[in-house]
Image (tube, rainbow, N blue to C red):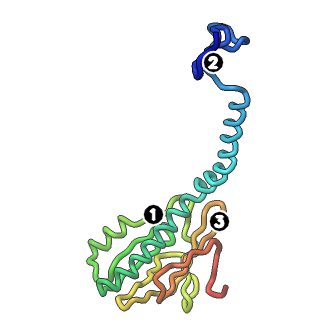
Amino acid sequence: MIPQRGKFSLPDALDKPPALAEDADLDGYTLIELVVVMALISTMFFFAMPRFRDNVLTDQVRKTSRWVITQTRHLKQQSIREKKDYILHVDIDSDKLWISTPDMEAEALEKAQDEAFQLSEEVAIMDVAFPGRGKILSGQVDIYFYAKGYSDKALIHLQQDNDRQVSFLIEPFLPRIKYMEDYSDFDN
């Protein structure tokens, strides 16, 4: 008897591999598959952990940096748009930053000071420097943003507990603030 074309069948004994028993469970992973997965996970952790560590350690500096950069840019734009002077208050002793206007009433000024941006315990304001007045190491410092579109030129210096220092340069006529990963002065 000749089999018809396309209709070839194997005997029942050849349907299953001979080495496997009838009730053998074929579900599971081989050792090579497990080793490959572990290698991939290890590689991901190798690259992710330094970034995670850096983000955890510098998160407070970045949070403060974002606030200073965003608020400074906003103050420059808002002072031009509203044709009104604004003041960025930097309280070095209590590590607070807040915003006011020269024509604010005492009650509104007190409210703005109560709602000030408080730096975390890990970050401190070192000083604020002005080109003609030098460095101010304590007390409250006011940086003005004028309605005509310029501001005071100032450097704000922050320090983290691990002695990491950052500087923010506020330029009078530029809309952006310059962020520097070290202690910078007007001389350098």
Along the viewing direction, whichever of 63 and 40 lies nearer the viewer: 40
Please name which of the two marks, 1 or 2, marks the residue nearer to the observer: 2
**Which residue in the protein does label 2 denote?**
26
Q: Residue furthest front?
A: 1
- Residue 164 tag number: 3
Quadrant in the rendering for residue 32: top right
Q: Are marks 3 and 1 in contact (CB under 8 Å)?
A: no
* As drawn, 51 above or below 106: above
Q: Position of residue 24 (x, y in %)?
A: 64, 11
Please name which of the two marks, 3 or 1, marks the residue nearer to the observer: 3
Specify which label sits upstream in the sequence, 1 or 2: 2
Specify which label sits upstream in the sequence, 3 or 2: 2
Q: How far separated are the C-alphas under marks 3 and 1? A: 19 Å
Please name which of the two marks, 3 or 2, marks the residue nearer to the observer: 2
Q: Position of residue 173 (x, y in %)?
A: 47, 89
Quadrant in the rendering for residue 142: bottom left
Q: Are marks 1 and 2 in contact (CB under 8 Å)?
A: no
- Report the amino acid beneath label 3: Arg
**Which residue in the protein does label 1 denote?**
118
Q: Residue at x 56, y 89 (%)?
A: 131
Which image quarter is the C terminus in?
A: bottom right
Along the viewing direction, whichever of 139 and 121 lies nearer the viewer: 121
